[in-house]
Image: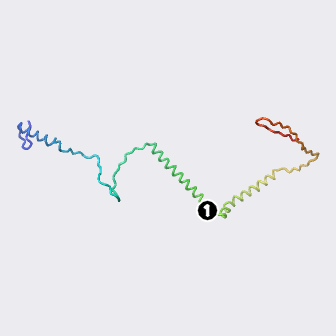
Amino acid sequence: MDFHPTDGRPMSDSEATAEAKRIIETEFRPEQPICHFPTSFRDDSPAPAYGDTPPVLQPDHRIVPAWAAGIAVASIGVGAGVTGIGCGAWLVLQGLASVTLTGVLMVTLPFAGLAMAATAIGGAISRARSAVTKNVYAGPVTHHTEIHNNSSTSGFCARTRNDVR
């Protein structure tokens, strides 16, 4: 048994049928659009020909693998290190390019002094170590100038040998 929605008394069959028909027509009308919440938005307004446009949120949901992130970080580190080495080399070469003759002589003077002292010390040690000997040659001296040609040259890899006696 159904009750009347306004006064709460029991409805007759004709009233229940009319109420059911009214509910079906109002709730299930095909021309009435069903309201859903929009899941996306498309702005069809034309873009301005020049000037600034308002920013549009563009969410980024990419997933980067750990190995790719590691390679990226390593390449940034290597690039920064090579840049530092290059800057250091550039500074050194700039300094060498602006060197004058007086500056070079002042820098190399201590090295030249050390080299001269080392040479003098080495010569003194060498003379002190060498034994004093006087060679006296007594006897006949023979000088051979005869050339005996025992050459036999033949073959792909030939060798010529001359005996001097």
Image x and y of residue 127, in percent:
81, 53
For the point 34% across and 55% down, the residue is: 55
Q: Dot 1, how many residues are within 10 Å of its Cα: few (below 14), some (14-19), or many (20+)?
A: few
Q: Quadrant of residue 157?
A: top right
For the point 68% across and 60% down, the residue is: 108
Q: Nearer the viewer, residue 100 or 108?
A: 100
The colour scheme of the drawn protein is rainbow
Above or below 137: residue 96? below
Q: Nearer the viewer, residue 78 or 146?
A: 146
Q: Secondary structure at mark 1?
A: loop
- Total number of numbered labels? 1
Image x and y of residue 163, in percent:
86, 40
The N terminus sits in image quarter:
top left
Left or right position of 79 against 13: right
Disc 1 target residue:
98
Image x and y of residue 97, in percent:
61, 60
Residue sitting at the far bottom: 102
Q: Quadrant of residue 48?
A: bottom left
Image x and y of residue 66, in percent:
44, 43
Q: Quadrant of residue 9?
A: top left
Left or right position of 126 against 29: right
Q: Nearer the viewer, residue 99 or 160?
A: 160
The amino acid at mark 1 is: Ser
Q: Nearer the viewer, residue 45 or 34?
A: 45
For the point 40% across and 44% down, the residue is: 63
Left or right position of 138 against 85: right
The C terminus sits in image quarter:
top right
